[in-house]
Image (cartoon, helix red, strand yellow):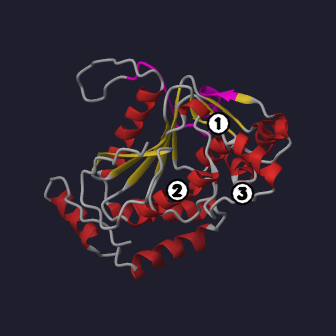
Amino acid sequence: MDPQPPRILFTPQHPLPNLSSETLLDFPSPQILLVTLNRPSSFNCISTTQHHELARIWEWMDNEPSLRCGIITGAGNKSFCAGADLKEWNESNTTGQKRFLPPSGFGGLSNRSRGKKPIIAAVNGLCLGGGFEMVINTDIVLASSSAAFGLPEVRIGVVAMAGALPRLIRTVGKQRAMECVLTGHQYRAEEMKGWGIVNEVVAADHSDKSGSGIRKKGGGHEGVVKRAIEIAETIAANSPDSIMMSKYGLDLGWAGVGVEEGTMKVMQMMRDNGVEGGENMKEGVRAFVEKRRPTWIDSKL
C-alpha cells in the first residue's frame, strides 16, 4: 500500500523525495522534519533501498530553506532500529548480489559529515548495530527509559563499518569503546547517558512542558518524540544562520580540525556567505536592543 502523503505546513522549494511505506515524514511545525522508520514488525531494520531513500531525505532537508532541524525515530515502542535487514543480507550472500550503502552511510546518517542542519535522535526501544551507528553521529540524542543500545556485530561475524568505530572512541574514550564493540554487550539508556552518548533519558510519563501540568503516558515512543519536538522547536526559534554556522564549527572539531584552523574556517564561511553582517545578524542585534523577539529570514547557506 502506498504511504499517505505527509501534511506539509509550508511550501517547499524542492519536491519531496519519492518514498516507500518504510519511511514516514511529518512536519510538527513549518521548520521541523520528523522522519519515522516504519518497519515495526521487523524491528525497524533498514533495507538497502531504504538507506538510499533516507539519504535523499536528509539531503532534501539540508537544501530546503524553511527547515531548521530534523528528528529521526522508529515506529512503535519495541525498536528504534535494530540494524541492517539480516534476511536481505543473508539472501544477498546466497545470490551474490552486492549491497551498497550511500556515501552518507547507514540510514544516510552514520557517515554524514557535511550535513548543514542538526538532527535529533528520539530513541525508543532497541537501538542496535547500524541503528546505534546512526545515533552516534546525530547531534542530540534522547532516549526512552526502556531503550537499549549496543553494537552486536562481533556476535554474528561482521564489523560495525558504517562510521561508528572512530566516532565512538572520540565520544566515550578507548576503554569504553573497546568494551562496547568487542563484547557486543547491550547497555541501558542511563548507562549511555553516563557515557556521554545520550543527552537525556525520557520516562514513559514524560511531562507536558506547556504548563498544563498534565502527565501523559507515552509508552516510551510518544514521550521521547514529544520531548524531541520540544527541543527542535527551541533550536528552530534561533537564527537559522547561527544554527548552521555553529554546527559547522562544532563538526570541524568533531572531525579533528585544530582550534585555530577551525575558527578561521568558520569565519571564512561566514564572510563568504554573507552571514557576517547579514540580515539575520542585524535583526538579532536590533531585536535585542528593541526588547522584542527577532523575526528571522530563511538562511541562504
- Judge the density around disc 1: few (<14), some (14-19), many (≥20) Cα neighbours within 10 Å: many
Q: Judge left or right: residue 219 versus residue 289.
A: right
Element class at badge 3: loop
Q: Residue at x 82, y 49 (%)?
A: 94
Q: Amino acid at mark 2?
A: Glu
Spatial distance from mark 3 to mark 2, Cα to Cα? Answer: 14 Å
Asked if residue 45 lies left or right of residue 70, the reply is right
Q: Are marks 3 and 2 in contact (CB under 8 Å)?
A: no
Asked if residue 182 can be seen in this view, the reply is no
Depth check, front residue: 233 or 147: 147
Q: How many marks?
A: 3
Q: Nearer the viewer, mark 1 or mark 2?
A: 2
Q: Which residues are magenta?
A: 187-206
For residue 99, the mark is 3
240 versus 42 height, above or below: below
Q: Is residue 198 magenta?
A: yes
In the rendering, at what x and y percent does residue 245 appear? 43, 65
User: Is tag 3's residue or tag 2's residue first in the polypeptide sequence?
Assistant: 2
How far apart in space, not on screen, are marks 1 and 2 (Cα)? 18 Å
Q: Residues within 10 Å of mark 2 (few under 14, many from 20)?
A: many
- The first of marks 3 and 1 along the sequence is 1
- Could one spot residue 134 in this view of the protein? yes
**Residue 267, how many percent across, how many down?**
46, 75
| Residue at 32% over, 45% down | 233
**Residue 82: mark:** 1
Question: Which amino acid type is marked by label 3?
Answer: Arg
